[in-house]
Image (cartoon, grey):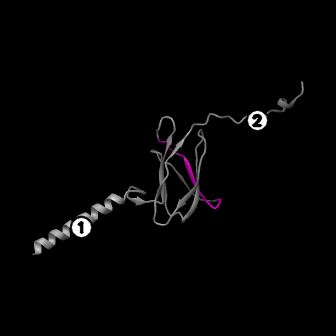
Amino acid sequence: MKPKVAFITIAAVLLFGIAHASDGDSGRVNGKKYDINGNVIHSENKKPIRNVNVTAYISSKKEKVVITDGNGNYAFDDLKPGTYKFVFEKEGFKKVVKEKVIIKTDESFQLNIEMIESNDFDLVPTPLHFADF
């Protein structure tokens, strides 16, 4: 009878471990759970973009800022539950704003972003522009 109980116990432990392993990876980076994480890539060549400033705002107040790593990954932890605006900025790229992102207690959220290169120049008229020749 004891070998049968041991077998059932081992099977139950294995099944429990498998069940938790299958649902446990979302929101985790290197084993740590984050409230929100994601990846920033170039819209045309799909390569990761490093050193993108990612700012989280709640109620128009800056909450936290992180920077993407060499693989374009970013992650926020310890964000208060609420509705956030996330701003992605890097020189040479158009700013990306994602509004109304809801962060809930004990739930993770993945937000992947594609950024477009900015070739726009801000043209400022010179005084000669308004001169009447």
Q: Which mark is residue 128?
A: none
Q: Earlier in the sequence, mark 2 or mark 1?
A: 1
Direction from residue 50 to residue 2 in the image, left or right: left
According to the image, label 2 marks what residue? 124
Direction from residue 70 to residue 4 in the image, left or right: left
Q: Is residue 28 magenta?
A: no
Residue reaching furthest to the bottom: 1
Of circles 2 and 1, the one toward us is 1
Q: Gap between marks 2 and 1, in whole Å?
A: 69 Å
Residue 99, quarter of picture: bottom right
In the rendered structure, which amino acid carries the disc numbered 2? Answer: Val
Q: Is residue 51 magenta?
A: yes
Q: Residue at x 53, y 63 (%)?
A: 79
Q: Dot 2: what SS? A: loop
Residue reaching furthest to the top: 133
Q: Position of residue 74 (x, y in %)?
A: 49, 51
The magenta-colored residue range is 48-60
Quarter of the image where the N terminus is located: bottom left
Residue reaching furthest to the right: 132
When the figure is inspected, residue 127 is found, relative to residue 65, above or below; the finding is above
Q: Position of residue 85 (x, y in %)?
A: 59, 55
According to the image, label 1 marks what residue? 13
Q: Residue at x 46, y 59 (%)?
A: 108
When the figure is inspected, residue 107 is found, relative to residue 111, above or below; the finding is below
Circle 1 residues within 10 Å: few <14, some 14–19, many ≥20: few
Q: Position of residue 98 (x, y in %)?
A: 58, 51
Quarter of the image where the C terminus is located: top right
Residue 117, quarter of picture: top right
